[in-house]
Amino acid sequence: MKHRENSGQILLIAAFIMASLLLSAQIYILDVGKTTSETETDSLYEYIITIKLGSEHVVTGSLANITNGGQTSILADNLQRWSDFVGAQYRFGKNVLNYTLEENALYSAGIWTHWGISTFGVSSAYASFTYQLSDREVELDQTYPINVTTKLLVRSTYQTLAGNEKQVNVTVNVSNEANPALAKQITIYYRRTETWLAADVTSNYTFVDYGNGTYRARFQADIPSDTVEVSAHVVDQREIYVRANATSTRV
């Protein structure tokens, strides 16, 4: 857990720095010789896109940190820092960036994690933003939502070999915002009596990456029970952690 927490903290810092640099770089570019009204319009559009992209980076980095052991309050803390940073910029006029964290049956303080015993796992952050820009020539009021979601679907089957030996097949599907996504790390566990053990990757273990968000692991293990339970722990390319358990079907 300590390694995952440190990893999340590093990515969070990187995400906030990246968001800040995106906006700072855009401001620098806009300041270099923009003269015509058409150019100003294009520049304003690029500036707004940069703010939205920066907001997404901060939400993503915060979710990575939270799912790797950080506090849920990190999302609000970092969005406030980002809003303050945006508010301090005056290239086109007065900037005001407000945010609201999602609150409903699934989300609390903008965060939804479901890592239960079902075959489905999710790690998600959801915030809505209102951006206002005003000066003598520009009046802009835009709202945009950002939902960063990593989902996991786990299915499993098994065959009984000799004695308590079982051959277990685990299929894992990973998605980001409902699109197939690549995983950075996948660890498969199985339950033996009351203990969860990692599948031994050095013996009778195969792993296939289909390159489309689908992964398949096969391993052998000594499991006395006829009920075979597995768990997939996944870190996606954004360092967001999610896991899900499944009960294997005997074939």
Image (cartoon, helix red, strand yellow):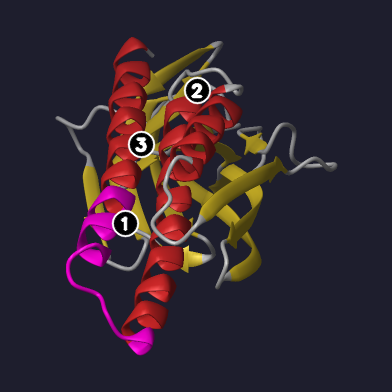
Q: How far apart are marks 1 and 2 (CA)?
A: 26 Å
Q: How far apart are marks 2 and 3 (CA)?
A: 39 Å
Specify the amino acid type for callout 1: Leu
- Answer with mark 3 or mark 1, whichever residue precedes in sequence: 3
Answer few, some or many: residues within 10 Å of disc 2's Cα (few below 14, many 20 plus, some between 14 and 19). some
Q: Residue furthest right?
A: 105
At 25% from the left and 27% from the top, the residue drawn is 200
* Boundaries of the magenta span: 23-38
Is label 2 in a helix, a strand or a loop? strand
Towards the viewer: 157 or 150: 150
Where is residue 109 drawn, in percent x and y? 71, 32
Q: Which of marks 2 and 3 is in front?
A: 3
- Answer with mark 1 or mark 2, whichever residue precedes in sequence: 1
Towards the viewer: 87 or 108: 87
Answer few, some or many: residues within 10 Å of disc 1's Cα (few below 14, many 20 plus, some between 14 and 19). many
Where is residue 185 drawn, in percent x and y? 28, 39
- Residue 34 is one of the magenta-drawn residues: yes
Where is residue 76 drawn, in percent x and y? 60, 30
| Relative to 149, residue 105 above or below | above
Q: In this view, does 112 lie to the left or right of 87?
A: right
Mark 2 and mark 1 in contact (Cβ < 8 Å)?
no
Q: Nearer the viewer, mark 3 or mark 1?
A: 3
The circle drawn on residue 16 is 3
Q: Nearer the viewer, mark 1 or mark 2?
A: 1
Is label 1 in a helix, a strand or a loop? loop
Mark 3 and mark 2 in contact (Cβ < 8 Å)?
no
Tell me the residue that label 1 is attached to: 182
Specify the amino acid type for callout 3: Phe
